[in-house]
Amino acid sequence: MTATYSVPQQRKLVTALPGPKSVELQARREKTVARGAGTLANIYMDHGAGAILVDVDGNQIIDLGCGIGVTTIGHAHPEVAAAASAQAAKLTHTLFTVTPYENYVAVAEKLAEITPGDFEKHSVLVNTGAEAVENAVKIARKFTGRRAIVALDHAFHGRTNLTMTMTYRPWPERAGMGPFPGEIYSVPTSYPFRDGLSGLEAAEKTIDYINTHIGASEVAAFFVEPIQGDGGVVIPAPGYFKRIREFCTENGIVFVADEIQAGIARTGVWYSIEHHGVVPDLITTAKGIAGGLPLAAVTGRADIMDSVQPGGIGGTFGGNPVSTAAALAVFNLIERDNLLGEAQRVEAALWARIGDWAEKFSIVGEVRGKGAMFGVELVHPGTKKPYPEALTALIKHATTNGVIALDAGSWDSVLRIMPSVVISDELIDDAATVLEEALTALVAAYPA
């Protein structure tokens, strides 16, 4: 795909990073912004286009993070900006549950069309991924009359009190934040690089844990990320989710696909659960849906969604007119510009460029990914022992050389690569070269 962008699609550094204006802004920030709102790289951005961000000092930086999977279609897409601007000039808010408007209905119609399953589907629109997960919990509990919620090891479902209880690791999300809600259970998952199990073997381990520790008849919902993002871009072995889906059906458990990070065209399909050939009962959507504006959704079987009484779900800003206008523009762009195909192109380019890193660099245990969502797991050479220090050094090298990449993994040892699906092969090559410089230095410096 060829496109014209307002910012040249190339990495260009005019100052050291962070530059002087970023340093000044950081000093201002430290006087007013809460420390808990931590930042990966203290490089302050001014504008962007496509796969390039431009900081306040004029440096052009390759973005391999997309705000953790949000700007899938590229930064500041002019058609999304125009749709949001036009809507803002007409109507910014009424609250859909007071006096409704068409955009909300149109987004729900599109979600019913693109989510897996040929049954009738209904949606509720909210603001954030965590809010979508919380509402999915409420809906599943109301529908089943049960309380227990199951999530997978290495999962990330949010930072609210409920969703951080569903999130696997204690640091930094949960530390010192308790007490937490009850009836939330973390169960073993499929992690092929670490467990060596087939999908069916891993699923039976999961099921046995539920049966012996919780009781299947007590479970309202089973939440899964078909590709775990913060957990380290973990992709369960083939057959894992098929067996879990069967188990949920057999036991009246609502099967929920949390697609907040991997959904909306990021992995070469609308929703990453499609790679597993499984149809969930409910799907949560956020991040990439509105091109950077706040919007999220729960979509699912009409009988499950409609089990909640009027007024039981929703919220003041959920599905506001401006965000929904942006989402409709995003849907149109994905279809018109074949961005599912572009995500598949990015996957092929990444495999071609970094797929051999485990053979080339002794500290790389595995490269894995789908579409524009890849993980590079770092280990001590000759072992599977996590190597978080290497990840810290790798990201520091990348950011100081104009490449934004993400950390991930329960042991902080997975490099997460999540570019826009419109990133060029040339930018992928340039960014990979920067990362390889750090990997080469790390391997050379590894203690004998």
Image: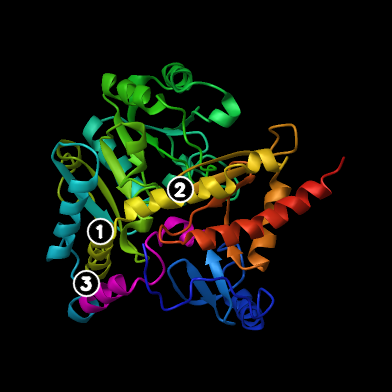
Q: Which residues are magenta?
A: 64-87
Residue 16 seen in this snapshot: yes
In the rendered image, which residue does mark 2 sit on?
347
Mark 3 vs mark 1: give the one in front: 1
Q: Which picture quadrant has residue 448?
A: top right
Image quarter (top left, top right, bottom left or bottom right) of the N terminus: bottom left
Q: Which mark is on residue 250?
A: none
**How many angstroms separate mark 3 from mark 2 (CA)?**
39 Å
The amino acid type, in three-letter code, at marker 3 is His
Horizontal side of residue 96 vs 176, given as left or right: left
Horizontal side of residue 375 vs 383, given as left or right: left
Say which residue appears at 49% left-offset and 71% top-offset. 9
Image coordinates for residue 47, horizontal then vertical, percent:
47, 77
**How many angstroms separate mark 3 from mark 1 (CA)?**
22 Å
The amino acid type, in three-letter code, at marker 2 is Glu
In the rendered image, which residue does mark 1 sit on?
331
Say whether marks 3 and 1 touch (CB < 8 Å).
Answer: no
Say which residue appears at 47% left-offset and 36% top-offset. 235
**How many angstroms separate mark 1 from mark 2 (CA)?**
21 Å
